[in-house]
Image (tube, rainbow, N blue to C red):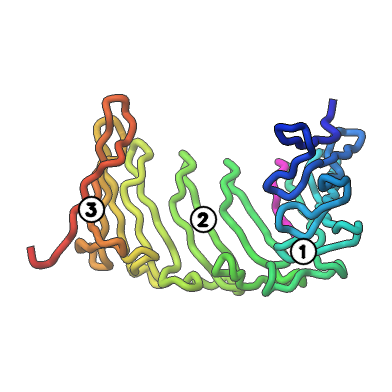
Amino acid sequence: NNETSMSLFDASGKAATNSNNYSRVTYSYDIYNHIIEIRYFDKSGSLVTFGKDKYAIEKHTYDSRGNRVGTTFFGKKEEPVLCNEGWFTSTRDFDGMNRVVRQAFFDLNRQPTNPNVIVPEGFVKYDLRSNMIYLAAGDGHGNLMISPAMGCAIQKSEYDKRDNLLWCAFFNEKEQPMLKKGTSYHRTTYIYNEQGKKIESTWEDTNGNLVNGDNGYAVVKYVYNSEGRLQEESYYNTKRGKCNNTTGYHRVTYQYSTSGEKEFAFAIYIFSPFF
């Protein structure tokens, strides 16, 4: 009962093309019902590239547990092609709990991709509750590297027993603390109340000093009403004094309808040192 094809038609019954540039798509399966090939066609029945990408054919492989461990792309002439992200084929490694722990990307020569286009290798670790606590970028040759997308080589995190994120920090190739590229902070830290509601967020440098984050403040505080709904959030500078965010306000309060839905109307309080 696997779906083997899907065709699109307009109101007059003629073949139609969707926003992803195809009129018909076909699927092939292995004996375990895993999709191993997808082909995209135009209204004339010729292979066509998917959306604005360069591939017309996807091919997939699986391990014995059904995890998709490989993806490869081919063009309209069934030739190997790079997708828009810059890779031809990708492989994935899984742990005993079927979680991705490594993904690698390769070019048309089946060599690690150009790091300036897409990081060749990524590594992931998890805690006992499957929260991602370690994410690292590799150059495909056994070395860690600064990922342009991540702004660091390693991102580490910790979660509490409620799976709330406690902190997230950034490190270089030598696992030394660093400021995330393009920012002034190394770490973000979150504090929660007994109900598991976040009551404070802070941004810190490599020495643990408060610094302004992306939106012009170093601390955010959250207040909840008796029903546990967010009632107020406010912003503070590196000395924990009141400040405005980059949008221009210091504090925002929320009101709720009788049904408990958050209303769009809210009050904004501008902080000024003169009153």
Q: Tell me if 74 is positioned left or right of 232 in this view.
A: right
Q: Which mark is residue 126?
A: none
Q: What is the number of callouts on the image?
A: 3
Image quarter in which the C terminus is found: bottom left
Q: Nearer the viewer, mark 3 or mark 2?
A: 3
Residue drawn at the location 81% of the way across and 67% of the way down? 107
What residue type is disc 3 on? Arg
Going from N to C along the chain, the mark reached first, 1 or 3, is 1
Residue drawn at the location 27% of the way across and 39% of the way down? 224
Residue 42 is one of the magenta-drawn residues: no
Q: Mark 3: which secondary structure?
A: strand
Q: Tell me if 22 is positioned left or right of 122 in this view.
A: right
Residue 73's spot in the image, x, y percent? 83, 56
User: In the depicted view, which residue is nearer to us: 186 or 261?
Assistant: 261
Residue drawn at the location 88% of the way across and 33% of the way down? 32
Can you identify the residue that label 3 sits on? 251
> Does the rendering let one see residue 40?
no
Can you identify the residue that label 2 sits on? 157
Please provide the residue range marked out in magenta: 97-105
Farthest residue in the front direction? Answer: 12
Going from N to C along the chain, the mark reached first, 3 or 2, is 2
Quarter of the figure with residue 109 = bottom right
Task: Give me the C-alpha separation between circle 3 and circle 2.
Answer: 28 Å
Can you identify the residue that label 1 sits on? 87
Residue 38's spot in the image, x, y percent? 83, 45
Q: Nearer the viewer, mark 1 or mark 2?
A: 1
Quarter of the figure with residue 237 = bottom left
